[in-house]
């Protein structure tokens, strides 16, 4: 079985952000265990290896490789609208799709002196991403720039509004993590600094 991912190009729209600069704010995320927007290079690497994608995943989840790869993309509209309605602490929102955290998160920064420090130990990366990384011989920086690695949406929020946001996410039974903070950066440096605890 060959895999094919088809998408329509769309106009990028700026994320919701106000002009207030709240450095050291929390970066909260909603998880998404779907390798959404796999790029064609990754798909081609899978195809070239003639992998039988109807085999079960090695993580003992009971799902096949193809079920994991073709899981529908999660839609966040209702959740985000409810969060915005019930919390004024959300300062920015970034949907993490193709381009991963590396390329999507910087699009919400209002100037070149803002960046983010992301702790890769703050969530467990779903096994499908490790499998794809190993299969395609993809290094860590490239996988973070190519796939969402289990993070579907990032919310930038004031520290003092964390509890009300957590409460809403918990009521909705959404998995979420605190993954980092907003930092000041030199405009010549990378906007996203990844680290592990």
Image: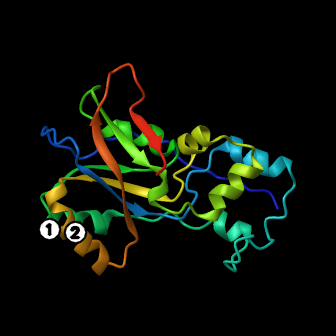
- Residue 10 visible in image: no
Q: Is residue 93 above or below residue 86?
A: above
The residue drawn where x is 54% and y is 40% is: 145
The residue drawn where x is 69% and y is 76% is: 63
The extreme top residue here reads 188
Residue 77 % position (x, y):
32, 63
Residue linked to disc 1 = 86
Is 109 on the left-hand or right-hand side of 85? right
Q: Which mark is residue 135?
A: none
Q: Nearer the viewer, residue 72 or 133?
A: 133
Is 136 on the left-hand or right-hand side of 24? right
Q: Split into 4 quadrants, where in the image is the N terminus?
A: bottom right
Secondary-structure class at tag 1 = helix
Label 1 near label 2: C-beta < 8 Å? yes
- Residue 84 visible in image: yes
Q: Is residue 65 above or below residue 159?
A: below
Q: Quadrant of residue 41?
A: top right
Q: How far separated are the C-alphas under marks 2 and 1? A: 6 Å
Q: Which mark is residue 82?
A: 2
């Amino acid at each position: 079985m060959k895999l094919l991912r088809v998408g329509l190009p769309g106009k990028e729209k700026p994320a919701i952000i106000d002009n207030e600069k709240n450095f050291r704010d929390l970066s909260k995320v909603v998880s998404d265990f779907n390798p959404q927007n796999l790029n064609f290079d990754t798909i081609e690497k899978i195809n070239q290896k003639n992998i039988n994608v109807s085999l079960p995943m090695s993580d003992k989840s009971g799902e096949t490789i193809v079920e994991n790869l073709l899981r529908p993309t999660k839609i966040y509209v209702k959740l985000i609208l409810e969060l915005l309605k019930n919390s004024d602490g959300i300062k920015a929102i970034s949907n993490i799709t193709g381009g991963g955290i590396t390329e999507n998160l910087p699009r919400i920064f209002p100037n070149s002196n803002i960046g983010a420090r992301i702790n890769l130990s703050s969530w467990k990366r779903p096994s499908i991403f490790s499998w794809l990384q190993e299969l395609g011989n993809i290094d860590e920086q490239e996988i973070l720039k190519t796939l969402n690695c289990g993070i579907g949406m990032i919310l930038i929020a004031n520290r003092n509004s964390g509890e009300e946001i957590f409460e809403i996410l918990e009521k909705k039974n959404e998995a979420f993590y605190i993954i980092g903070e907003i930092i000041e950066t030199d405009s010549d440096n990378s906007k996203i600094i990844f680290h592990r605890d």
